[in-house]
Image (spheres, rainbow, N blue to C red):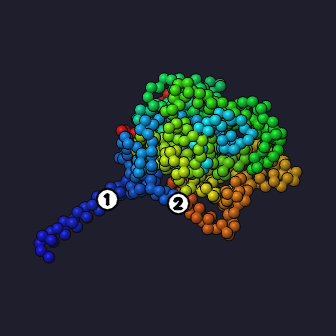
């Protein structure tokens, strides 16, 4: 071999070694200091792209020296076919990019208790009409069936354990960004009216226009002040995003006219025990839903009055399930499954449905992409913009759930639940299955005496009441339901040998997701109380909170 060839060969080897050294240095130098309890754990060691249990690659998770995620450029030519602006063709007309955004979120509303999702009893004329103009999601899910974790996941695009706020009345890690931090630098005015259940305040830095959780809240502040919404829409020149965070139909059920519902004539859902107390409570709950429907109708009317209908993406969200047993605070479908109705004239076809499986963490990435921002952030959510345009599109294989009694009123000392849901099956892992599940329903502190009436009926020899009241407080370690044949999750197949393969497959996928989230099961549960929000974070100032713009992305 001549000298020239030897020289070229050695040069090639040196270049290869240099590339390897640079790669090792850039991937191995992170997180050398012990983590602060208010900073997110290193969910992406080595800086390699994350793979979630769906098999999809999350965007690169490398951190900047300041501990924040890298700031992406604006996508001047967004392509809603997938994350990162990649895709084959542009699906959104150019004049539809950067729409106004209106999110109306109910509070503790089981998704089947409105007309668009099949209720024959509850009067929701505004939602019924809106559904005719919208795309209805048939497989939408939140992650935790209680208020604070649901909202912080929705606004941050990060699942509850990973953002730090998985117990109720908890707080996210200090480096977590949320909706205002992404949209405000794009020129959006980002406001919210009504219920607040997020912490720290500076991480969820919406411009608070007013409501129950403001420092100067009026006595009637448990109702959305639609005059504030009108002023916001009228006064804002550029693009705006507004969350109308209703407090209905959260207990106490004291809004609306319960007399419009005849307790003797309504149909009691099959998963509830039919008692006089159950029926009476349903009439009050239904009245609140109708009251909320009127508020939603007023919000839509404002869009018409100010000629904002055509350029506004409207999302109606049910949040999690109601306070009835087997709904809120559980990971059964009545608790975790949710409703989403989406309207966007010129983009979304009217009166359509989709079977694409989505979670509430997917909403923020969807809005970011609709606003023209590239998806270069390490979020758990994935934009479902392609589904809005093509409802037949697929999105997720699984929806995941995490639940704890830490932080809830009259909650068990420890009752951790994890779940995974496909379109056909739901698998639930009750980590504290030897303990007794408790909340305000079982404690008897609720004024409606629903569960007490179930136990009384059981004591009188009613086998169905006995089965339901027993199962609510004492559950097996594993539950598996064929949702095609057991919509209300009556038949547990976890010990059926013919479903062993499905059980193992879903359990494996659930544990893989937990690992990706940094969820250590009982250890995470044991430390849950360390995530409790500070006492001074409950009431929000009007406007943008102090330090609220510090996490805004830099374009």
Q: Is residue 248 left or right of residue 46?
A: right
**On screen, 428 above or below 325?**
below
How many angstroms separate mark 2 from mark 1 (CA)? Answer: 27 Å
Q: Residue at x 42, y 45 (%)?
A: 90
Q: Residue at x 68, y 48 (%)?
A: 334
Residue 324 image label: none
User: Percent x, y for residue 258?
Assistant: 76, 32
Q: Residue at x 84, y 51 (%)?
A: 458
Foreground residue among 542 and 106:
106
User: Percent x, y for residue 167?
Assistant: 59, 46
Residue at disc 1, secondary structure? helix
User: Percent x, y for residue 461?
Assistant: 87, 53
Q: Is residue 179 left or right of residue 467?
A: left
Query: Which residue in the protein does label 1 denote?
Result: 23
User: Percent x, y for residue 404?
Assistant: 62, 50
Quadrant where the C terminus is found in the figure? top left
Q: Determine which quarter of the picture holds residue 418.
A: bottom right
**On screen, 199 above or below 487?**
above
Q: Residue at x 40, y 43 (%)?
A: 78
Q: Determine which quarter of the picture holds residue 118.
A: top right
Please report whichever mark, 2 or 1, sits nearer to the chain's N-terminal start.
1
Query: Which residue in the protein does label 2 denote?
Result: 512
Label total for image: 2
Q: Is residue 512 left or right of residue 221?
A: left
Foreground residue among 124 and 26:
124
Quadrant where the N terminus is found in the figure? bottom left
User: From where the camera sits, is residue 96 visible?
Assistant: yes
- Kindly check if marks 2 and 1 are in contact, taking CB atoms under 8 A apart as contact: no
Please, which residue is most extreme toward the right here?
A: 460
Q: Residues within 10 Å of mark 1 (few under 14, many from 20)?
A: few
Foreground residue among 516 and 100:
100
Q: Is residue 12 left or right of residue 33?
A: left
């Amino acid at each position: 071999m001549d000298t020239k060839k030897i020289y070229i060969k050695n040069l090639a080897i040196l270049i290869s070694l240099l590339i390897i050294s640079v790669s090792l240095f850039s991937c191995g130098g992170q997180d050398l200091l012990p983590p602060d309890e208010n900073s997110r754990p290193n969910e992406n060691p080595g800086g390699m792209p994350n793979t979630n249990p769906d098999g999809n690659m999350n965007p690169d998770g490398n951190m900047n020296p300041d501990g924040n995620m890298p700031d992406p450029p604006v996508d001047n030519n967004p392509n809603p076919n997938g994350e990162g602006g990649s895709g084959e063709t542009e699906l959104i007309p150019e004049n539809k990019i950067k729409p106004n955004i209106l999110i109306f979120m109910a509070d503790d509303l089981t998704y089947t208790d409105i007309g668009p999702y099949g209720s024959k009893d509850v009067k929701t004329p505004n939602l019924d009409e809106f559904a005719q103009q919208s795309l209805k999601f048939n497989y939408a899910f939140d992650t935790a069936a209680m208020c604070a974790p649901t909202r912080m996941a929705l606004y941050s695009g990060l699942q509850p354990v990973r953002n730090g706020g998985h117990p109720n009345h908890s707080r996210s890690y200090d480096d977590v960004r949320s909706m205002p931090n992404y949209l405000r630098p794009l020129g959006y005015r980002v406001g919210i009216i009504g219920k607040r259940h997020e912490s720290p305040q500076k991480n969820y830095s919406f411009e608070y226009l007013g409501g129950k959780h403001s420092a100067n809240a009026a006595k009637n502040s448990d109702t959305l002040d639609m005059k504030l919404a009108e002023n916001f829409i009228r006064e804002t020149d550029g693009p705006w995003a507004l969350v109308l965070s209703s407090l209905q139909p959260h207990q106490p059920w004291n809004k609306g006219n319960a007399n419009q519902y005849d307790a003797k004539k309504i149909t009691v859902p099959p998963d509830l025990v039919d008692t006089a107390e159950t029926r009476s409570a349903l009439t009050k709950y239904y009245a609140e839903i109708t009251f909320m429907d009127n508020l939603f109708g007023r919000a839509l009317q404002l869009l018409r009055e100010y000629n904002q209908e055509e350029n506004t993406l409207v999302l109606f969200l049910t949040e999690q399930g109601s306070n009835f047993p087997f709904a809120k605070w559980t990971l059964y479908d009545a608790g975790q499954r949710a409703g989403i109705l989406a309207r966007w004239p010129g983009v979304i076809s009217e009166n359509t449905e989709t079977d694409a499986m989505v979670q509430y963490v997917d909403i923020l990435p969807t809005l970011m992409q609709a606003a023209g921002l590239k998806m270069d952030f390490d979020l758990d959510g994935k934009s479902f913009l392609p589904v809005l345009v093509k409802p037949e599109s697929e999105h997720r294989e699984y929806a995941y759930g995490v639940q704890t009694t830490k932080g809830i009123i009259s909650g068990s000392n420890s009752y951790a639940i994890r779940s995974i849901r496909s379109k056909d099956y739901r698998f639930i892992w009750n980590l504290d299955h030897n303990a007794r599940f408790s909340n305000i329903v079982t404690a008897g502190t609720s004024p409606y005496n629903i569960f007490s009436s179930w136990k009384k009926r059981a004591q009188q020899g009613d086998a169905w009441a006995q089965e339901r009241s027993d199962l609510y407080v004492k559950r097996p370690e594993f539950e598996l339901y064929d949702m095609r044949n057991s919509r209300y999750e009556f038949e547990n197949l976890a010990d059926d040998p013919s479903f062993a393969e499905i059980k193992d497959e879903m359990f494996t996928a659930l544990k893989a997701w937990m690992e990706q989230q940094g969820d250590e099961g009982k250890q995470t549960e044991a430390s849950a109380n360390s995530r409790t929000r500070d006492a001074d974070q409950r009431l929000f100032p009007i406007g943008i909170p102090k330090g609220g713009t510090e996490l805004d992305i830099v374009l």
